Amino acid sequence: MILVNSKGILSSFGYALRGIIYVIGTQRNMKVHLTAALLVVTVGLFLHLTSIEWLSICSAIFLVLIAESLNTAIEAAVDLATSERHPLAGIAKDCAAGAVLLAAIYSLVVAYLVFWPKISSIFFG
Ligand SMILES: Nc1ncnc2c1ncn2[C@@H]1O[C@H](COP(=O)(O)OP(=O)(O)OP(=O)(O)O)[C@@H](O)[C@H]1O
């Protein structure tokens, strides 16, 4: 029984991993988000962030990655539901894209609040 359950958990993990790989492989925006995240983490290591600052940065990064994954899922579901133009299909895709934009704005606010005081003190004393 435990073996069957753990096999189920393993396959669910495999499907989830397949989803993540699909989003990274097919969505240009996801590659942009990951590149930005790598850059931010590199700067964060250089600036010796505190735990709370890392928590804020990681929350912002993961929020954007999660939003982009859900956006891709909604686009796929809409495209499966209809190949015709339909106002509701447009609304679904626009709202999903809006969620990614909101997450991206949040991440810019977090980056500004965390990095700007440190960078300004390095350059302007
Ligand atoms: N079936 C549809 N009916 C009505 N409007 C649609 C439909 N499909 C797409 N649209 C409109 O076109 C916009 C772009 O849709 P599309 O599927 O190309 O998304 P995208 O953001 O360009 O996706 P990708 O990230 O794959 O480039 C949507 O936000 C929506 O306004």
Image (cartoon, rainbow, N blue to C red):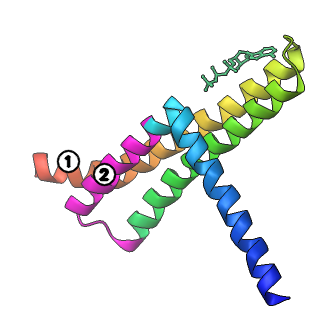
Circle 2 Cα neighbour tier, 10 Å, few/some/many (<14 / 14–19 / ≥20): some
Measuring 73% from the left and 24% from the top, which residue is drawn there?
A: 94
Q: Which residues are magenta?
A: 32-51
Residue that mark 2 sits on: 115
Between the residue at mark 2 and the residue at mark 1, the CA separation in whole angstroms equals: 8 Å
Measuring 13% from the left and 52% from the top, which residue is drawn there?
A: 122
Q: Nearer the viewer, residue 48 or 4?
A: 4
Q: Which mark is residue 104?
A: none
Measuring 51% from the left and 52% from the top, which residue is drawn there?
A: 60
* Magenta-colored stretch includes residue 123: no
* Magenta-colored stretch includes residue 41: yes
Mark 1 secondary-structure assignment: helix
Circle 1 Cα neighbour tier, 10 Å, few/some/many (<14 / 14–19 / ≥20): few
Query: Residue 79: x and y, percent?
Result: 80, 25
Measuring 80% from the left and 89% from the top, which residue is drawn there?
A: 2
- Amino acid beneath label 2: Phe
Mark 2 secondary-structure assignment: helix
- Left-right relation of 72 to 23: right
Above or below residue 18? Residue 86 is above
Mark with earlier residue (2, 1): 2
Q: Nearer the viewer, residue 69 or 60?
A: 69
Q: Quadrant of residue 102?
A: top right
Q: Quadrant of residue 73?
A: top right
Mark closer to the observer (2, 1): 2
Query: Residue 28: x and y, percent?
Result: 50, 30
Residue that mark 1 sits on: 120
